[in-house]
Image: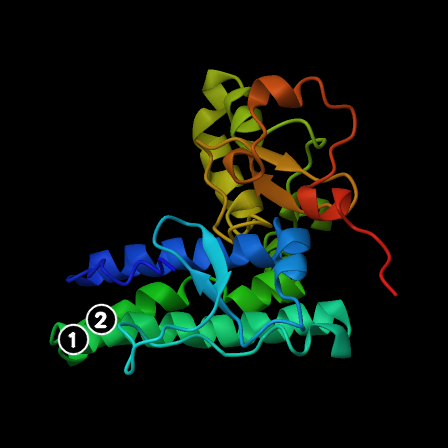
Amino acid sequence: MDTGSQYSPRTVEDIFRDFKCRRAGMIKALTIDVEEFYQQCDPEKENLCLYGLPNEQWEVNLPAEEVPPELPEPALGINFARDGMQEKDWLSLVAVHSDAWLLSVAFYFGARFGFDKADRKRLFSMMNELPTIFEVVSGTAKKQQKEKSVVSNHSSNKSKSNSKPNQRGSESLGKYSKMQPKDEEEGLDEEDEDEHGETLCGACGDNYASDEFWICCDVCEKWFHGKCVKITPARAEHIKQYKCPSCSNKRVRP
């Protein structure tokens, strides 16, 4: 098992980068790769843990053999509850424990390298700017995003429809912003910031950036970084109706 325990970030920026990568891997397991994750969490197996790795990948494996372990351990036995509750509730529960593990790993590194009060506060502030894994998995982040957009639009007398991306699934937000005439660029930058600044990727949970390719699922209407769902602008041009991996793999379970 390689949980990235040999990697030792030493600065606030290093630890935050490590936090983001591990978080991205766990979000991927609970959203994009949910079918594979579900299958690996066999209740017939021993105590299993979900690990987020520094390379933005995830791993379901047994806990470390050494005591104490090199890094704090994730929640043990996540597989035992898989068939004893609704899948959505089970995924949300795993997400909550994953959030707790990410914080413990980050502050483990901070304590190990002697962070003072100011460094700990700055590290937590940087992590707290991102939605939690639970918020991404449960859809709470999307709900909060919409509520913020409604308040913002009400104060600026804009329609609710302007608070979210309005392009069809096979068009990117970045491409949309670049299609405007040059004399409108200044006003467009402000408008894009208002309309799309709170948009979150359904895979990694990161915010919208105008220089990145995005695509919207025509089923669940969530937006994704093209790189997160392995869709390029060229490929998107030939997609009539896009389904994200989660919607494509969705099936009825007993």
Label 2 Cα crowd, 10 Å radius (few <14 / some 14-19 / many 20+):
some
> Could you say where residue 80 lies in the image, as x and y percent from the top left?
65, 78
Residue 68 drawn at (x, y percent): 28, 82
- The residue beneath circle 2 is 109
Q: Which amino acid does label 2 sit on?
A: Phe
Residue in the picture at 47% in, 55% down? 58
Rendered image quadrant of residue 11 = bottom left
Q: How far apart are marks 1 and 2 (CA)?
A: 5 Å
Q: How many marks?
A: 2
Q: Residue at x 71, y 17 (%)?
A: 238
In the displayed structure image, the side of residue 14 where residue 148 appears, left or right: right
Closer-to-camera residue (254/101)? 254
46 or 229: nearer the viewer: 46
Residue shown at 77%/73% (left/top)? 86
- Measuring from the top left, give residue 217's x and y in whole percent: 71, 40
Q: Mark 1 points at which residue?
A: 112
- What residue appears at the point 53 percent right and 57 percent down from the top-left corner? 27
Kindly indicate whether the residue at mark 2 contacts the one at mark 1 (C-beta within 8 angstroms): yes
Q: In which quarter of the image is residue 236?
A: top right
Q: Which amino acid does label 1 sit on?
A: Arg
